[in-house]
Image (cartoon, rainbow, N blue to C red):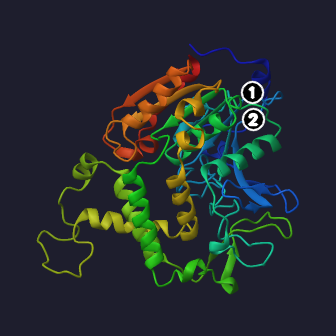
């Protein structure tokens, strides 16, 4: 049985803005400039940055009391486009489309859902590919070092800008789950319901190792040019609604840059997102375009799994910036909730949030033991904590793939 809606929430139902049919699920990316040159964001590493442009999307209607906002924290290579389509001709909807909407896991009849591109990203929020207002050139590797705490500071500023005093909920998987954990540690009373999926209070040595190899692939690409690969003469804005002089994200028409290195980094990372059973079931040792082995060293896509990984790499370089990949993977490496707050109990001991932590049986990048560590710290601190290990053959990607079981879990948690 679902809990009754607040009057403020009920009032919002008269103007539904996000439905179930495609024509009722059209969305528009919005953006706002936060902080400024005079009032910059002070970063954990000691540097400052401002202004910061933040790209975000909203699904559903914010109640008059602004007490029904639910924040989506995206993962490493995600963005603000979590649901819906920009137009009916779009081939694919947002990355969590099946999970967000009326009657879905995050119910837009109850909640106004917000998703923002992270600081350091490359999809509308200020990052390395944006123009540095001090120089008129893309930041490149002159972009300041950022941490998960810095990313959360920006999200909190966005929430404040929208007039929201407290979030009804926040949810995230992987890097997104780290953001949720940092949020409830940094601001213990800011969130009513915190949901952490396939994540951890710090990245394991194994995770750091894979990130290091991915970054090395980018550094070693001859087209990396120490991060200065942006072709100013050919660049185009990926954000059309910037005011004059605002920092803008850019992509290159020429296709230059460390494309090979970034594709290789994606291929390496994608292996960690899968499980042995899912790879064996989907590909096994099957050949791609032949029934016999070619005995040819130069044939790079002889097996189906090779072809699949090459495809993932090729698709990734069309939508992601190599410098953003460097900065965000390093932010994951640095994340250590216990170290930052002098113990995990101290980090989570003051939160008033009801917390749900979920792991997946075949996720070896963020194994269940790390999720249990979070839950144990919450319980020892006397906090409301729920935990579930979900069965799935899909490895770390399960929180994006197994939408139906996640919907049932989240719905039960929010309705309890």
The one of 187 and 308 positioned closer to us in this rendering:
187
Q: Residue at x 11, y 71 (%)?
A: 292
The one of 320 and 356 positioned closer to us in this rendering:
356
Q: Which residue is mark 2?
A: 61
What is the CA distance from the residue labelled 1 to the residue labelled 2? 8 Å
Could you tell whether 408 is left or right of 97 in the image?
A: left
Give the position of the N terminus as an image quadrant: top right
Could you tell whether 324 is left or right of 297 in the image?
A: right
Q: Residue at x 63, y 34 (%)?
A: 184
Q: Which residue is mark 1?
A: 13
Q: Comparing marks 1 and 2, which lies closer to the viewer?
A: 2
Tell me: residue 42, above or below residue 263: above
Residue 297: image location, x then y, percent: 19, 80
Could you tell whether 190 is left or right of 32 in the image?
A: left
Label 2: how many residues lie within 10 Å, few (<14), some (14-19) or many (20+)? Answer: many
**Proximity of marks 1 and 2: CB atoms separated by less than 8 Å:** yes
Tell me: residue 150, above or below residue 236: above
Q: Secondary structure at mark 1?
A: helix
Badge 1 or badge 2: first in the primary sequence: 1
Of all residues, the one furthest to the front in this rendering is 342
Residue 311: image location, x then y, percent: 38, 67
């Amino acid at each position: 049985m679902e809990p009754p809606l607040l009057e403020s929430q009920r009032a919002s139902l008269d103007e539904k803005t996000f439905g179930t049919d495609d024509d009722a699920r059209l969305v528009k990316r919005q953006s706002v400039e936060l902080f400024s040159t005079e009032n910059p964001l002070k970063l954990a590493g000691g540097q400052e940055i401002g202004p910061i442009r933040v790209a975000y999307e909203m699904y559903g209607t914010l109640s008059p009391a602004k007490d029904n906002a639910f924040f989506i924290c995206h993962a490493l290579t995600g963005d603000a486009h979590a649901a819906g389509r920009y137009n009916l001709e779009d081939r694919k909807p947002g990355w969590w489309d099946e999970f967000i909407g009326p009657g879905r896991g995050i119910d837009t009849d109850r909640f106004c859902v917000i998703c923002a591109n992270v600081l350091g990203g490359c999809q509308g929020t200020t990052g390395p590919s944006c123009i540095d207002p001090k120089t008129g050139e893309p930041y490149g590797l002159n972009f300041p070092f950022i941490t998960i705490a810095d990313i959360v500071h920006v999200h909190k500023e966005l929430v404040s800008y929208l007039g929201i005093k407290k979030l009804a909920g926040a949810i995230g998987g992987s890097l997104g789950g780290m953001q949720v954990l940092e949020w409830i540690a940094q601001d213990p009373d800011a969130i009513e319901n915190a949901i952490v999926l396939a994540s951890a209070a710090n990245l394991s040595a194994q995770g750091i190792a894979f990130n290091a190899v991915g970054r090395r692939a980018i550094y070693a690409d001859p087209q990396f040019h120490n991060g200065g690969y942006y072709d100013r003469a050919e660049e185009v804005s990926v954000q059309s609604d910037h005011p004059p002089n605002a920092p803008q994200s850019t992509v290159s028409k020429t296709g230059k840059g460390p494309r090979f290195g970034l594709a290789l980094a994606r291929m390496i990372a994608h292996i960690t997102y899968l499980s042995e059973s899912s790879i064996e079931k989907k590909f096994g040792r099957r050949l791609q375009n032949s029934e016999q082995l070619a005995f040819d060293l130069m044939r790079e896509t002889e097996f189906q799994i090779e072809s699949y990984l090459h495809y993932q790499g090729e698709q990734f370089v069309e939508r992601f910036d190599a410098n953003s990949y460097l900065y965000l993977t390093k932010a994951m490496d640095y994340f250590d909730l216990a170290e930052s707050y002098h113990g995990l109990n101290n980090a989570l001991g003051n939160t008033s949030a009801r917390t749900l932590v979920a792991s997946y049986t075949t996720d070896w990048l963020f194994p269940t033991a790390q999720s249990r560590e979070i839950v144990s710290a919450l319980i020892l601190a006397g906090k409301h904590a729920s935990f579930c290990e979900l069965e799935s053959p899909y490895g770390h990607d399960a929180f994006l793939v197994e939408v139906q079981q996640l919907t049932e879990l989240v719905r039960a948690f929010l309705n309890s």
